Image (cartoon, rainbow, N blue to C red):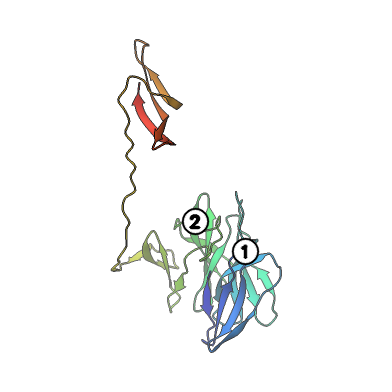
Amino acid sequence: MPGAHWTPDGEYIVVSKGRRIAKLWMYHVDGGGGIQLNENPAQMKTIDPFVSPDGKSVYFSHRSGAWNYNALLPQYQIGTYDFDKGQITSITSRYGSAFTPTLSKDGNWMVYGSRWDDKTGLVIRNLKTGEENWLAYPVQRDEQESIAPQGVLPAMAFTPDSKFVIASYGGKIWKLAIDGSPAVEIPFEAEVNLAMGPRLYFNYEIKDTTAKLATQIRNAVPSPDGKKISLHGTESIVCNGLSRRQADTSNFT
């Protein structure tokens, strides 16, 4: 499920439901079938929901379609769903996309992910003035080119005083100050039992002969007398009656 967030009163949870063209749904804490918040546009994918601190709207990442090969930016933008009006409004237009919105408890700040050049970073927006700055750059790679089944970026959270953002990237947890101070690592330890299978290793014998059949030749270097040649290549071999290829056979003559 690509995202879920509680309403401020703790009575409802808003989730993104669906694998390819996900939509926003709201469920009561007591259960039930829930209600779908957005149906149209039919091809609008809506994920990473975040309910505003005043409970009046839902912020989310949206794009047209599930995903596509050789995708060009932008892919995602941030939208809002108004509970009273039932309307969707897009509030970003960044070339590097905008996704995974996270709001502060006081309602003054929004942090979201975006891409600049070939790296992903976190942008902070003053919701009162609209001013934006980079909060952290770079962080971990986003999921814009995939179906993003668990969201475009890992979820983030503001501290209760709205002065810091807690985010994870690079295998660590970070405390980011909204005033631009250096990020502070939050240390943690975890006991992990990781099952590992046997190493897969295929040892093909390469005979030491004066000649060898190469089907692909690279980096050929002739000897000074011009009688021999050293190269990298790909050798065709036969093992148990099956034709296989020994890749990158080095420096045979």
Q: Position of residue 206 (x, y in %)?
A: 32, 30
Q: Position of residue 199 (x, y in %)?
A: 31, 50
Question: Up-down: is 16 above or below 138?
Answer: below
161, 242: nearer the viewer: 242
Residue 172 as seen in the image, left or right of residue 38: left
Q: Is residue 208 visible?
A: yes
Q: Residue furthest top?
A: 225
Q: Position of residue 158 (x, y in %)?
A: 45, 74
Q: Amino acid at mark 2?
A: Thr
Label 1 vs 2, first from the N-terminus = 1
247, 221: nearer the viewer: 247
Q: Give the numbered dot on residue 92.
A: 1
Q: Nearer the viewer, mark 1 or mark 2?
A: 2
Q: Are marks 1 and 2 in contact (CB under 8 Å)?
A: no
Q: Position of residue 116 (x, y in %)?
A: 53, 53
Instruction: Tell me the crowding category of disc 1: few under 14, some 14 to 19, or many 20 or more residues within 10 angstroms, Cα based.
Output: few
Q: Quadrant of residue 247?
A: top left
217, 103: nearer the viewer: 217
Q: Looking at the image, which residue is at 68% across and 72% down?
A: 88
Q: Quadrant of residue 236?
A: top left
Question: Up-down: is 241 above or below 102?
Answer: above
Helix, strand or loop for disc 1: loop
Q: How many marks?
A: 2
Tell me the quadrant of the picture where the C terminus can be found. top left
Question: Up-down: is 52 above or below 21?
Answer: below
Helix, strand or loop for disc 2: strand
Q: Quadrant of residue 170?
A: bottom left
Q: Give the numbered dot on residue 120.
A: 2
Q: Looking at the image, which residue is at 41% across and 28% down?
A: 233
Residue 197 as seen in the image, left or right of residue 78: left
Give me the C-alpha separation between circle 1 and circle 2.
16 Å
Q: Amino acid at mark 1?
A: Thr
